[in-house]
Amino acid sequence: MDDSSNQDTISRDFIRNRIAEEIETGKCRKVITRFPPEPNGFLHIGHAKSICLNFGIAAEFGGDCHLRFDDTNPSKESKVYVDSIIEDLKWLGFYDAGKTYYASDYFQQFYEYALRLIRNGKAYVCSLSPEEMREYRGTLTAPGKESPYRTRSVEENLDLFEKMKSGGFPDGAHVLRAKIDMSSPNLNMRDPVLYRIQHTSHHRTGDKWCIYPMYDYAHCLEDAIEGVTHSICTLEFEDHRPLYDWVLDEVGTACHPQQIEFARLNLGYTVMSKRKLLELVEGGDVNGWDDSRMPTISGMRSRGYTPASIRAFCKRIGVSKKESRIDMLMLEEAVRDDLNENAPRVMAVLNPLRVVIENYPEERLPDEFDAPNHPAKPEMGTRKVPFSKVIYIEREDFMEDPPKKFFRLGPGREVRLRYAYFIKCESVEYEDSGEIKELRCTYDPETRGGSAPDGRKVKGTLHWVSEKHAVKAEVRIYDRLFNKENPDGGKEAGDFKDSLNPESLTSLEDCLLEPSVENAAPGKRYQFERQGYFCLDVERSQGRPVFNRTATLRDSWAKAKS
RNA sequence: UGGGGCGUCGACAAGCGGUAAGUCACCAGAUUUUGAUUCUGGCAUUCGCAGGUUCGAAUCCUGCCGCCCCAGCCA
């Protein structure tokens, strides 16, 4: 895997350190990790962190990483999510033609293991209602009470569990519980539910089952069945580790993976929970899971992020147990790094200002320039950029009354049109409204190519597009999705949607692009010189191509202005 | 008032008893037909706080403070 990022020092986090040591001492021979998404939503950048960790470790230590769907709750899951997850994983550059594992493939084994627990007196069918069960559980500081059903005989439990399985009871009538310790200070150990009745058709097993295993019961067994050595999960499961170990010990699996927890990724000005992302999608606050403003893998893909940039980002942020919130700047910097290196340059005017070059001939042979596609990489070739009497420049590149430090165009000033000529602003034409209509300029034919034989210098270089050759396009400018750094933070944080940024999407309808982009394929990424990185969307709007702004260029002028 | 974690530069993050890596951000300068890129230099006498052990502590011990997670038949 080639991350084209510069500083690719070998990351040394506590997990890798630990595995390296286990391999050295022979405690671990071949590392098996797994990435276990529940197919109930799209993958997001937080998952990418986990993917890079798990697949990365497997690759670095010569092991394997299993993509395994943790599909134990059919009421929330579906095939469309399975498909999207596989697509995202492939796009990220992991999992090429690998085997796909499913928890649902182990349902029969889980069932048999449950029978074993029952026979060993380690599990029982409980008929308390959910409300009763909550009462019996006790509180954080008070121990729970044992269920009156806890002492059912093995035979009765076996009989009841069999009836649960064969559909003899309605949802919620009974559950199978582990018999552990109702007074444990760890609430997860107070006779946790192992199985619940759910008459829901499963996207893979159909109606074969009407009991489904709970996470705590299923997950460790999935790992053990697959011979996973390191089961890496997020911090909130730390309290579940005793239960993870308990199930494996009581079932007596041959393999006993170790669970290791790390801090999940949080990013500023966005949300990362699948539940909240779903809410945005369903509430129409964004245009789907793959909206370019979403922190989902598919959203970032449509925005123009590259797989390598996401991998580089994950490498840079590291892995630890400290809860943190990472600045978006880190992500942006990662794409810029990649795109600066690899995106061809092109000129595009986003907010056009018409410029008539008065001394340029009305009709003449085609005047065009060979512009390099990348100023530092001649191997990327050149393309033709046509010039003509009427061109457009960026509105913000002209000021009627410019301050001293403004290097661009102003009345009487001379600037360079990139790769073309020097032009000088002679006069300004106005609309009735007083708005600037167009500029009247003159050019210096001697400066063809962009430099003056007399050696005179010019402070600014502007990008431009020839009017009669321009390709019209729509360009979508994205800003942060939320106005608050931590939209779901705060004590009694109300609806997280209250801090949605109403200006997260701005559409520029009348952009003009140089003709070389005409036949670009959807997904094609460019640097629009002096503006940023943009990606051609699959969608077209009113026949015009639509570009998404991936990231801006760094702009020290903007900084200086404010 | 239970249990489990975590506290090193503005944001991440190494370090695991021998005297604070790196990344992003930021600042200064150089080069530049993108005010981009690139390059050079700067940026924690200090590791939540207070004690203690030690020739020596971010690293060990004690106490305190702060933050996060746990009472789904979700994962």
Image (cartoon, coloured by chain):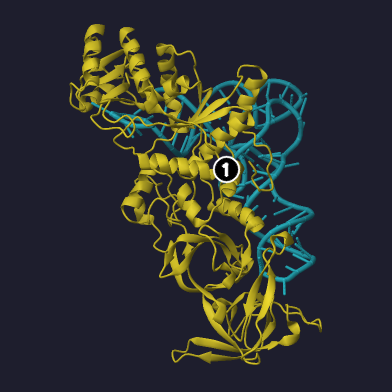
Chain colours: A yellow, B cyan
- The image position of residue A11, as x and y in percent, is 65, 37
Q: Which of the pair A143/A360 is nearer the observer?
A: A360
The spot of residue A553 in percent (x, y) is: 60, 63
Quarter occupied by residue A244: top left
Q: Position of residue A192 (x, y in %)?
A: 32, 21
- Quadrant location, the C terminus of chain A: bottom right
Residue topped by disc 1: A314
**Does A541 appear above or below A500?**
below
Residue drawn where x is 71% and y is 64% of the image: A375
Q: Residue at x 81, y 82 (%)?
A: A453
Furthest residue in direction right, as rendered: A454
In the image, B25 versus A23, the foreground residue is A23
Of helix, strand and loop, which one carries label 1?
Answer: helix
Q: Kindly identify which chain the residue marked by label 1 belongs to.
A: A
The foreground one among A451 and A360 is A360
Q: Is residue A463 visible?
A: yes
Residue at x 25%, y 20% (from the top left corner): A165
Q: Quadrant of the N terminus of chain A?
A: top right
